[in-house]
Image (cartoon, rainbow, N blue to C red):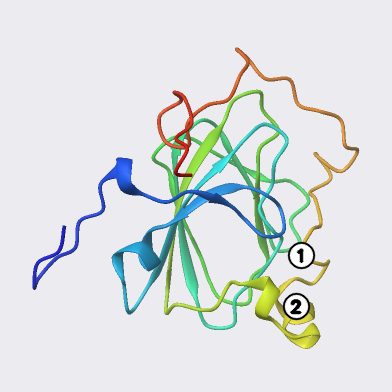
Amino acid sequence: MTDDDHVLLRAADALWRESNQMKVLNTDLAKQLAAATLGARIWRLRPGQASTKHCHLKQEELYVLLEGEGKIRIGDDTDPLTIEPLDSLLIRPATVRQIFNDTDADALWLVVGAPPESANTLEMTAQQLTRLYPEGPKSLPPELADGSPVPRRGGGRQSPAAGGPTSTRS
């Protein structure tokens, strides 16, 4: 729903897709809402998944864990931070970061950044990829690097947002 002063995206109408590099389910809220001055996505990391290990040139990013247990490695820290639901973390530009899930349950993150920067690795030059993804766009954190599957409670597929059957629109 749109009006002159606001845009509403209903959860049921949000388009979810897997990311290009790490195949993490996400919805690009900023794009779907036509936001002009910020980027915003919700990311659902399943057990054993990680985001890209990356940095930004000018963008600050706000990370909010909505569900589950979150892990994030920042800069050269050897120990990741453990984030609890509704904890918030701001990361400055040029700082390398990577969220990951080494638990047996999904982790749902809201990530908001400003000013917006292109995040499509398929459209980047080799030089841009090297600068923004210092270990390559598919590097895993040590906790997941051995390739061992993380056990999952329950079983079956879960919806991106609520844990029910996955919509065919996704």
- In the rendered view, would you say 138 is above or below 36? above
The residue carrying mark 2 is 129
Residue at 48%, 72% (x, y): give it.
60
- In the drawing, does residue 28 fall left or right of residue 102? left
Camera-side residue of 23 and 71? 23
Residue at 25%, 46% (x, y): give it.
10
Mark 1 and mark 2 residues within 8 Å of each other at the beta carbon: yes
Q: Position of residue 54 (x, y in %)?
A: 68, 67
Camera-side residue of 163 and 52? 163
Q: Earlier in the sequence, mark 1 or mark 2?
A: 2
Camera-side residue of 96 and 17? 17
Q: Residue furthest front?
A: 168
Q: Position of residue 109 (x, y in %)?
A: 48, 45
- In the rendered view, would you say 165 is above or below 83? above
Three-letter residue code for mark 1: Pro
Dot 1 falls on a residue whose secondary structure is loop
- In the rendered view, would you say 94 is above or below 151? below
Could you classify mark 1 by the number of other residues whose Cα lies within 10 Å: few (under 14), some (14-19), or many (20 or more)? Answer: some
* Marks 1 and 2, how far apart at CA: 7 Å
Q: Position of residue 110 (x, y in %)?
A: 43, 50
Q: Residue 137 carries which label?
A: 1
Location of residue 142 by image quarter: top right
Location of residue 118 by image quarter: bottom right
Q: Which mark is residue 147?
A: none
Three-letter residue code for mark 2: Leu
Location of residue 154 by image quarter: top right
Dot 2 falls on a residue whose secondary structure is helix
Residue at 62%, 56% (x, y): give it.
19
Could you classify mark 2 by the number of other residues whose Cα lies within 10 Å: few (under 14), some (14-19), or many (20 or more)? Answer: some
Q: Quadrant of the N terminus?
A: bottom left
Q: Residue furthest right?
A: 146
